[in-house]
Amino acid sequence: MRILMIGDVVGSGGRRAVGELLGGLKTELDIDFVTLQGENLAAGIGLTVDTVVEMVEAGADVITTGNHVWDKREFIDHLDDPRLPVLRPLNYPPGTPGRGATDDSGPVAVINLIGRVWVGEFDSPFAVVDDLLAGGFGQGKPVVVDFHAEATSEKAALAWHLDGRVAAVVGTHTHVPTADCKVLPEGTGFVSDLGMVGAVDSILGVEVDGSLNRFLSGYRQRMQPVRTGLMNFNSVLIDLDDSTGHASSVERVDRQIEI
Ligand SMILES: [Fe+2]
Ligand SMILES: [Fe+2]
């Protein structure tokens, strides 16, 4: 089993890069299952039904999210639609719209969590995922975790906490790919951050001026994703040992394409 996990896809430029590249990568790398970080799909903030459908048609099996999942308010009503394979972080309070883990239908079980260091006030991702796994979640199939968090230490800590209990823990949210792919001793694959699908000439996928002026002026200015130009496509390939369900290798799959 080979699972490709794609970093935060930023706006139309990111979506177009996924559309151009993912089909070919699935064939080239013999990929069985694809997760995609979708919190920035729609104009860089949030998701819409159309952008989710576009990514499913491009080859994504499950779309995970993070802190930006609430930004397109009209999408909140769709978070519980069983036809859309969209998760929001599991460790929001009970009663929050949406779901934080997949149901039993797919070949891979996916869990979406959000970190607490420099991100916000949430239930403990450690305790919440422990409870889910203790309840028998994903038994008999590989389990992968998208941990949407800022601090690399928190991401590594969660991976070590889950070592041997899940197939992989990958970090998202920073939009910056990290070079620390590894398999932990008990068989859990890990990388601190997948990175993004977004413009090379940008700050985290958005236009340089808007982001830079925020730091120069001290107030938040309008930020737009970069829609054209050279795009980074950052992802990680998890190769699983089918007999154990553990990761046998984790490697970066990074491409660039002119959009
Ligand atoms: Fe993001
Ligand atoms: Fe985020």
Image (spheres, rainbow, N blue to C red):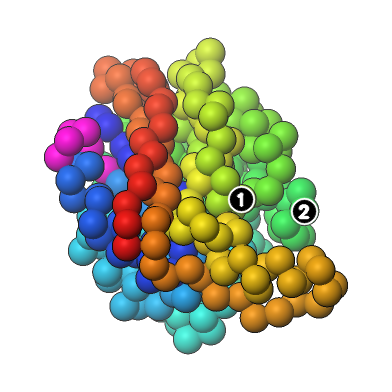
Q: Could you tell me residue 35's position as x and y percent?
A: 36, 49
Magenta includes 28? yes
Is the shortest distance between ligand 1 and the CB of mark 1 under 8 Å? yes
- Residue with the mark numbered 2: 118
Secondary structure under the numbered disc 1 in the rendered image? loop
Q: Is the residue 229 above or below the residue 184 in the image?
A: below
Is 95 in the magenta?
no
Task: Say the numbered circle drawn on residue 174.
Answer: 1
Q: Is residue 4 left or right of residue 211?
A: left
Instruction: Give the camera-side residue of 126 and 256.
Output: 256
| SS for dot 2 | loop
Crowd around label 1: few <14 · some 14–19 · many ≥20 (10 Å): many
Residue type beneath disc 2: Trp
Q: Which residue is painted at 62% across and 25% down in the image?
A: 160
Residue 236 makes an appearance in the image: yes
Q: Residue 85 versus residue 153: which sits nearer the camera? A: 153
| Residue 218, x across and y down, in percent | 84, 72
Q: Which residue is drawn at 65% across and 81% down?
A: 222
